[in-house]
Image: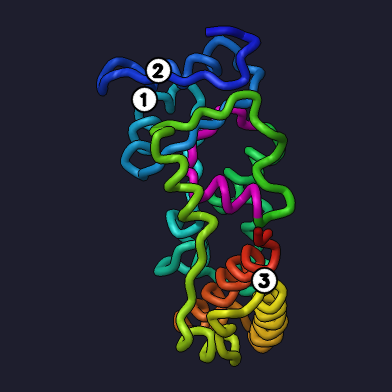
């Protein structure tokens, strides 16, 4: 294990202690930022159980945290996602408290999943703080599939019409035409999101919240299309 090596690959049988090796860098150098990425919630939970006493922070997507002011909703469905300025966003919400701790480097030993990491690093301004000193990619043999899934995007004609109010581009469209379609779709999404006033976000129904979340997610997907480089 060379200190000069930028990439280290470890292949070993199940139960041989790979999880401990992944955490060893933090245990030996607690001032370094170590991020462990997993492909499944089960494996993420396994790390959490093993190393919680060593300060491991288990960070997941918003849908895994309950809202403080609306008990029957997750943070992903909460009014704050529609623009409502919830008092707990600055302190008291488990999700936002954990994100802030990572972004401000108050916690340096982090366990999360590929999907959440990729989304935060690519579609949010702050990401998850400074780059890690060590990034552990568990189940690295699935990396290509994970990246391919993250970069892929699909939308039906029905959804394009109902959510964007426009038809899909023709099959023989050029890259420039597809990019123009994506840009037009993002403009339409901005208009539709504007119809959901942030001042009334707290009073939106679950159906309205789902529509806001769906439009927001679709905007991110269209960004992928608009910024794609065709060869």
Between the residue at mark 1 and the residue at mark 2, the CA separation in whole angstroms equals: 9 Å
Q: Is residue 138 magenta?
A: no
**Span shown in magenta:** 106-122
Nearer the observer: mark 3 or 2; the answer is 3
How is colour applied across the structure in the image? rainbow
Q: Quadrant of residue 46?
A: top left
Mark 2 neighbour class, 10 Å CA radius: few under 14, some 14 to 19, many 20 or more = few
Spot occupied by residue 45 in the image (x, y as percentages of width and height): 36, 38
Nearer the observer: mark 1 or 2; the answer is 2
> Which quadrant would the C terminus be assigned to in this image?
bottom right
Between the residue at mark 3 and the residue at mark 1, the CA separation in whole angstroms equals: 48 Å
Q: Quadrant of residue 193?
A: bottom right
Mark drawn on residue 175: 3
Q: Residue at (53%, 90%) from the top-left corner?
A: 161
Nearer the observer: mark 3 or 1; the answer is 3
Q: Are marks 1 and 2 in contact (CB under 8 Å)?
A: yes
Q: Are marks 3 and 2 in contact (CB under 8 Å)?
A: no
Mark 1 lies on residue: 50
Residue 205 in view, yes or no:
yes
Q: Earlier in the sequence, mark 3 or mark 1?
A: 1
Q: Earlier in the sequence, mark 3 or mark 2?
A: 2
Mark 3 neighbour class, 10 Å CA radius: few under 14, some 14 to 19, many 20 or more = some
Mark 2 lies on residue: 20
Spot occupied by residue 120 in the image (x, y as percentages of width and height): 61, 50
């Amino acid at each position: 294990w060379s200190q000069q090596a930028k990439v280290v690959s470890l292949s070993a049988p199940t139960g041989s202690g790979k999880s401990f090796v992944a955490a060893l860098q933090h245990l030996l150098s607690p001032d370094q930022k170590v991020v462990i990425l997993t492909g499944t919630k089960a494996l993420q939970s396994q790390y959490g159980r093993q190393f919680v006493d060593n300060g491991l922070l288990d960070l997941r997507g918003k849908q895994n945290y309950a809202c403080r002011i609306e008990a029957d909703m997750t943070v992903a469905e909460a009014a704050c996602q529609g623009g409502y300025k919830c008092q707990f966003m600055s302190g008291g919400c488990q999700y936002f408290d954990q994100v802030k701790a990572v972004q401000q480097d108050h916690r340096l030993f982090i366990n999360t999943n590929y999907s959440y990491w990729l989304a935060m690093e690519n579609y949010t301004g702050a990401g998850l703080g400074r780059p890690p000193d060590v990034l552990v990619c568990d189940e690295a043999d699935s990396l290509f599939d994970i990246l391919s899934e993250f970069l892929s995007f699909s939308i039906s004609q029905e959804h394009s019409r109902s959510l964007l109010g426009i038809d899909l581009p023709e099959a023989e469209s050029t890259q420039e035409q597809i990019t123009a379609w994506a840009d037009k779709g993002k403009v339409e999404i901005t208009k539709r999101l504007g119809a959901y006033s942030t001042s009334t976000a707290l009073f939106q129904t679950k159906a309205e919240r789902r529509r806001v979340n769906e439009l927001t997610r679709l905007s991110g997907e269209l960004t992928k299309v608009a910024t794609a480089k065709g060869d």
